[in-house]
């Protein structure tokens, strides 16, 4: 009797489709893709940035400060690397005053060139 009753329940509710976990995942992914696509369409219709908005963004992100920090770190790293290379090439001997002066002059020349070429003003001109 129980088998007949269970069989009847299966046939009675056979037309009802209960979504399983996999079907829900597919549905959620489809909805997410539609929302992302909609956002990209809205962004694509936005006005191009003005020079003022780019300047404000650069100020808000503190680009000038970041460039200065980058140049300082690069100078420090270059100085350390040059000193290590000089020590390796001298096989542990002490560098002469002339060698130290030549190395410092070269480092200052490179540092000056880098500061000139990577100055905030030149970088800003690239974007404005």
Image: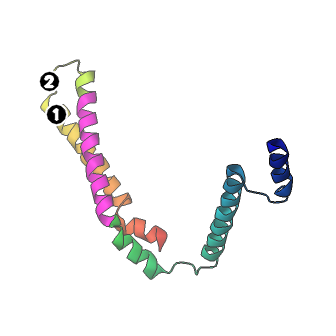
Colour mapping used in the image: rainbow
Kindly identify which residue carries mark 1: 98
Kindly identify which residue carries mark 2: 94
Image quarter of residue 17:
bottom right
Q: Does residue 88 appear in this view?
A: yes
Is-magenta flag for residue 71?
Answer: yes
Q: Residue at x 32, y 67 (%)?
A: 62
Q: In the image, residue 36 lies at what x, y percent?
A: 63, 66
Seen from the viewer's position, the closer of residues 6 and 128 is 6
**Relative to 88, is 7 on the left or the right?**
right
Q: Residue at x 40, y 76 (%)?
A: 55
Q: Does residue 112 appear in this view?
A: no
Q: In the image, residue 35 lies at what x, y percent?
A: 64, 68
In three-dimensional space, the C-alpha distance between marks 2 and 1, rounded to whole angstroms, equals 12 Å
Label 1 Cα neighbours within 10 Å, binned few <14 / some 14-19 / many ≥20: few
Is the N terminus in the top left, top right, bottom left or bottom right quadrant?
Answer: top right
For numbered disc 2, what is the local secondary structure?
A: loop
């Amino acid at each position: 009797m129980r088998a007949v009753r269970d069989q009847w329940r299966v046939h009675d509710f056979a037309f009802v489709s209960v979504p399983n976990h996999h079907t829900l995942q597919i549905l959620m992914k489809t909805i997410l893709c539609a929302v992302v696509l909609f956002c990209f369409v809205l962004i694509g219709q936005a006005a191009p940035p003005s020079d003022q908005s780019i300047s404000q963004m650069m100020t808000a992100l503190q680009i000038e400060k970041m460039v200065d920090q980058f140049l300082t770190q690069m100078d420090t790293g270059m100085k350390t690397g040059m000193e290590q290379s000089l020590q390796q090439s001298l096989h542990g001997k002490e560098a002469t005053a002339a060698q130290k002066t030549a190395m410092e002059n070269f480092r200052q020349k490179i540092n000056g060139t880098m500061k000139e070429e990577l100055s905030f003003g030149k970088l800003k001109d690239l974007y404005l």
